[in-house]
Amino acid sequence: VLIVDLLTLVGFVAIALRTDRFWPLWVAGLQLTTMLAHLMKLIENDLLAHAYGAAGRFWVYPIFLIIVIGTWRHHQRVHGNRFVELA
């Protein structure tokens, strides 16, 4: 899980550095807090499993929400504000 979270952080930081949008920076910052949970576990091996799990998963939903909103806004910017029919 540490390796996946680290690679995810690297990917989000790379995206944040290449774009002029603000939301990838938020996502990278929130992913960094997830990495801090791994650091806490490395420092304090007796950390409760529930606290470690909660710290590692807490920011997943806000990250997902930010990605969804950022993707939707990008779509609106590229295609205009017209209604897109899915049928």
Image (tube, rainbow, N blue to C red):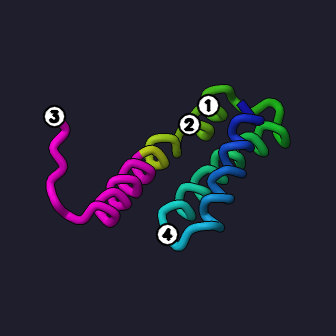
Residue 40 spot, x, y in % from top left: 76, 43
- Give the structural element (helix, strand or loop) at label 1: helix
Which residue is at the front of the view, 65 or 46? 65
The residue singled out by tag 2 in the image is 57
Residue type at numbered disc 3: Ala
Q: Are marks 3 and 2 in contact (CB under 8 Å)?
A: no
Decide whether residue 67 is among the magenta residues.
Answer: yes
Residue type at numbered disc 1: Gly
- Give the structural element (helix, strand or loop) at label 4: loop
Residue at image location 77% in from the left, 35% down from the top:
3
Q: Are marks 2 and 1 in contact (CB under 8 Å)?
A: yes
Q: Residue 87, labelled with which disc?
A: 3
Quadrant in the rendering for residue 8: top right
Name which of mark 3 and mark 2 comes first in the sequence: 2
Name which of mark 1 and mark 4 comes first in the sequence: 4
The residue singled out by tag 1 in the image is 53
Name which of mark 3 and mark 1 comes first in the sequence: 1
Which residue is at the front of the view, 37 or 26? 26
Q: Mark 3 Cα within 10 Å, few/some/many (few <14, many 20+)?
A: few
Measure the alpha-carbon separation of dots 1 and 4. Answer: 28 Å
Q: Is residue 17 above or below residue 35?
A: below
